[in-house]
Image (cartoon, rainbow, N blue to C red):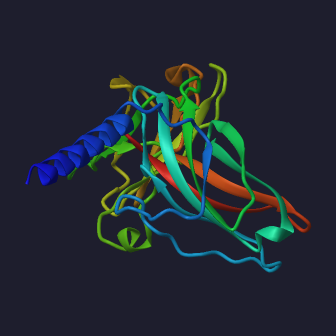
Amino acid sequence: MNGKKLTLTMICAALLFTSGCRKSGAPSQPSVETQGTAPVGESAKQRPHRFFDNGVAPYIASISPDTIVVHEGHAPMQKFTLTYEINNSDKATKAEIQVNVPGVGQVQRSDIAVQPSGQIEFLLDASSFDLGPTVRLRAHCTSSDTDWLTLGDDPPDASQRMGPGVPTVSPLYVDRHGQAGAVQVSIWSPQITKDCTVEAKVDGQSVELKNVSAIDKQVRGQLSYSDLQGRAVAEHHFEVELVVYGSGMPRADSIQLKFAE
């Protein structure tokens, strides 16, 4: 009986020691490759494959998390796990991850292993990039107003656009400019009539649009670049691309990280 107790005690001690080692281990280094495709959790949704005529098909299976935190026009450094596949990888000579923001440009790129499948953890550091102010618009009409719409939000998908009363706003993003000049902004909605005007706020402060005009289902006006402080207004997602190089290439697959507060 004492022998059994001693054996059980030794097993428990070994388990506690092993658990303690896991907790005190060094943090994972960014962009460390893991051979093979790891299981994908519920938060990392699988996507349909894409195929190309030369047989080489880069494919991003998942990315987790699938949003990126943005606060007051900046995204702090964040860690992501990306699972990928490269069909006919023997025909490829190089692969890399590129991260772009529409309206801002490329914010990061890094080489990854050319292999049939793999998983990487990487730090996305876009903290030095200005993603722009928050620009909100709404149509003010005699009968009713539209909801406030945010410049840069992704447009509704086809099923939503076919629904009644779904407003949209454009442009999707604004490139960086100086203080002079203006950009035309528009709202489309079935409830807009010729008597409507448009209201705008930049970072919560009301601004006046110039040359406002309305027709049925659309109202538009000129937003001064000076009201944007000459800043770009990014489309509200990051585009993460897996780009593969070789003969008859590059080929690419991409996935979006939507903004989250």
Is residue 181 visible in the rendered structure shown here?
Answer: yes
Front residue of this view, candidates 137 and 222: 137
- Which image quadrant is residue 165 in? bottom left
Quadrant in the picture for residue 201: top left
Q: Note whether residue 199 is visible.
A: no
Residue lying furthest front in this view?
A: 2
Determine whether, in the image, residue 184 is placed left or right of residue 215: right
Residue 204: name its quadrant. top left
User: Which residue is pictured at 38% across the width and 53% down the height?
Assistant: 194
What is the x, y in percent for residue 256? Answer: 52, 54
Q: Residue at x 65, y 21 (%)?
A: 180
6 relative position to 140: left or right: left
Residue 248: image x %, image y %?
A: 90, 68
Residue displayed at 62% across by 40% down: 103
Q: Horizontal placement of 89 versus 39: left or right?
A: right
Q: For this rendering, which residue is in front, 260 or 155?
A: 260
Q: Residue at x 43, y 63 (%)?
A: 40
